[in-house]
Image (spheres, coloured by chain):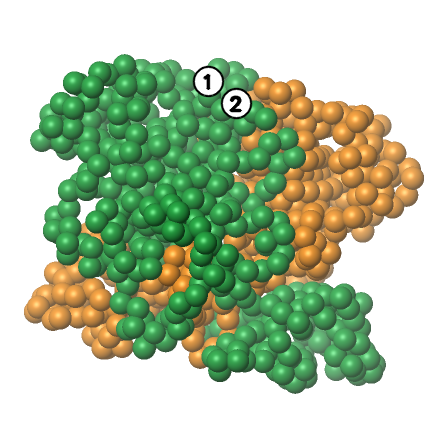
Amino acid sequence: MTLPLEGIRVLDFAQVYAGPTCTRLLADLGADVIKVEGLKRMDITRNFIMPENTAAEDYWNTSGYFLLRNGGKRSLTLDFSEESGGAGIDIVKKLIPQCDIVVESFTPHVMAKLGIDYKSLTAIRPDIIMISMSGYGQNGPWRDFSGYGMGLEPASGMSSVTGYEGGDPLRTGISFTDPYSGIVGAGAVLTALVYRRRTGKGQYIDLSEQEAAIPVVGYALMEQVMKGRLTKRIGNRSYWYAPQNAYRCLGDPDGQGDNWIVISVRDDAEFAALAGALGHPEWTKDKRFADNASRMKNQDAFDALIEGWTKDKDHVEAMNTLQAAGVLAAAVLNPKESLLDPHLKARGFFDRVDTGNAGVRPVAHQLGAKFSAFEAKSARRAPNLGEHNAEILSQLLGMGDGEIAELKEKGVIGDTPISAVPLPVMRMFVQFPLTSYQNMGALGDLDTDYREQLGIASEQGETK
Amino acid sequence: MAEGALSGIRIVDLTQGIAGPYCTKLLVDSGAEVIKVEPPEGDYTRRLGPFPGDKPDPEKSGLFIHLNGGKKSIVLDIGTDDGRAALGKLLASADVFVEGEMPGRMGDLNLHYNDLSGAYPNLIYCSITPFGQSGPYAQFKGNSMAAMALSGLMYITGDPDKPPLCTGGEPADYFGALHAWVAILAALEHRSVSGNGQHLDVSCLEALGCADEYNTPMYSYLGAIRKRFFSRHHIPTYPSEIFPCRDGHIVVIGGATGFPLMMAILIEQPELENNPLFQNLWLRTIQWQDFEKILRPYVVEHDWDDLLTRAQELRIPFAAVMDPQRLLDNEHLRERAFFAEIEQPGVGKLPVATHVFKMSETPLRAAPAPALGSDTKAVLG
């Protein structure tokens, strides 16, 4: 069972979310991904989501967030700063002949300043494939803008078509364009690999996170171009069909009351199925709902009728009932319900990963495809900071113990971050103020038995 | 024309809608040959518009043009023996076959991977469906909103006192497209080494679920269920909010270096540097209403371009809230030549969102979308 990228080595300077998504996919497909971090600039996501919200002595090795995007990589710490006399850069240049792909997500010019831009790299390895993943790309008036994921979804246009009717534009509840552009980056690199295999030529890829996601608003773009008007925000409704919306269901036993189902009717047959399932087959003869155009016009009235049925139903049971009748319906699951969903479980979507420092945890796949010829290597833990320094330097550069110890002495490599804020303060900072979040309404009650619920309780003790 | 990255690769594409067609769009833009097999009535996006002048015309649908430029179109009714025979013949010369039928239908037509892999052992056969080929929901009907719902992403998108909100633009279909594209490219690499094709099973729900950032980790690491709260993050990043400004909206983001001083300078009240809400991130996050009372009145009286430019000069990562017109007019995107221009027969010149990444040796290419069945004769003979 050979993986497609076995034998391919990636030098990965990317941090945070988009770039690491790209290289995580390459790692799952078999590439040897060496994640390069600075001790003064470790990946910031090592600070996010501590097990039991408790920061350990080496809390940067226990992050649930970092694990998602960095499972299966090797970690190399290198100091690029001038104080280290360029030793970090020398090591990079020595590694390049053994690397096929370089991924970076700095703002433009940083790689050139470090002397490792594409042109410099081709002098060392002519067929290198390099991808720069930045917020706004390598040229143009916005190239030097600092780009955060939370800003790039709106900058791509997606937020202009997301929001309640008559309300402000809204983002998704995660940094949507980060994983989006990360996958685009992985596809671009694979495209370059196919080309290199045929021609022997490498190339440079300039990916702007803003641009990568613009096609998602393709319909609205064409509406603007063809009809000269902006697409309105319409909440959960459809531009094309009615009825479609989110409908309230029966509340939780604990009274949180935030259960919903989405229903979408796309043609007359689905409408008849819905009317039948709701016990009102006569609705198909009602003039207000006779065809899609009438249903579009009268969707407020129809939404009220649907909610009359859903409001005392369990959201998951209602989904099963409606789907069995041929209606497109889906329960709006909260994150816990997604983790426990029988379909995702049957599909093996969540791996049980032995994370090392945080025990066994269910972790979502990073690739939404199953391959019949091989299994993508998804269930691997993330590396500790600098975990593979000695291994990489000896294996790839033939360095001896003395040389490696000297680099450690000089602070070029290491396994403890150097933080401007004292580590004990950082340790407090990386723990969420959970009670305040609950009082605000941003978090529900904690499930103290969540490990039992997830079936990982018995495995917790062994790996700690 | 210069050689494309995927020159010489032939793809037969039976999909309709968004997920399958956007996947093969990324392949055709890189130089692959894509033969789009449409039913006699055409891909249903030909009927979704938008249409110039709101006049429905299967050759003028904006969404269809957006997703199918550069492909060849042939018409085959795979419900008939002749149609299936013609498709089978076509697959003999194909490297990749992409389909998006309800699981089970291809088997009923004797066109499942298992029916074909004997005759075509090196064929890469990719199925893209809402929920995948197996599992309790395999036969469920789905769309992007259903994937948003089941992935847990919809639950945490929107405002606490309102229903969960689906992200616009059918994102689960586009995520499904990207994962299928990556899977096909990986399978092509695999085939180069092993010589063998394979079956790829892509679920749009799972493709979207992969985008999760910290909803499931917040539960699987500490038993916390994130709730819908203005689409706000729980990691310490407040503010990263969309605020109304004088001429639209702007994303107000503090970033790593915006507080306390730079934001105070930006809003021309430097004394706020000493305000506890500017000094303390957690305090600001928790007492966000108080913080917004300071920010919003200033932001609403200024233009987005002015706020964006000044904030970025101060290294505060504000971002624009672009709508389609702003994207089309944007000087930055123009200088980067993001939009390509095509001449679509019957419609005229159209900007298309082609250059989603820039490759130095094998640039992506844009082309008009095919008329229904325009290549049937040339392809089938």
Residue placed farthest to the right in the image?
Answer: B81
Q: Quick one: label 2, few (<14), some, or many (20+) residues within 10 Å?
A: many
Asked if B58 appears above or below A11 in the picture, the reply is below
- Up-down: is B227 above or below B214? below
What residue type is disc 2 on? Tyr
Q: Secondary structure at mark 1?
A: loop
What residue is at 31 percent from the left and 48 percent from the top? A62
Secondary structure under the numbered disc 2 in the rendered image? helix
Question: Distance between the Cα atoms at labels 1 and 2?
Answer: 7 Å
B203 sits to left or right of A336: right
- Numbered disc 2: what chain? A
Q: Colour of chain A?
A: green
Q: From the viewer's perspective, is A287 left or right of B1?
A: right
In this rendering, is residue A275 above or below A389? below
Dividing the picture into quadrants, the one containing residue A238 is bottom right
As shown in the figure, which amino acid type bears the numbered disc 1?
Lys
Image colour assigned to chain B: orange
Q: B211 or A430: nearer the eye?
A: A430
Tag 1 residue: A201
* Quarter of the image that includes the N terminus of chain A: top right
Q: Is residue B321 visible?
A: no
Q: Residues within 10 Å of mark 1 (few under 14, many from 20)?
A: some
Residue bearing the label numbered 2: A195
The answer to whether the residue labelled 1 contacts the one labelled 2, judged by CB atoms less than 8 Å apart, is yes
Q: Earlier in the sequence, mark 1 or mark 2?
A: 2
Residue found 83% across the figure and 29% down from its top: B89
Q: Which mark is residue A209?
A: none
For the point 80% across and 25% down, the residue is B119
Q: Quadrant of residue A340?
A: bottom right
State the image coordinates of residue A232 (x, y, percent, origin top left).
52, 68
Chain under disc 1: A
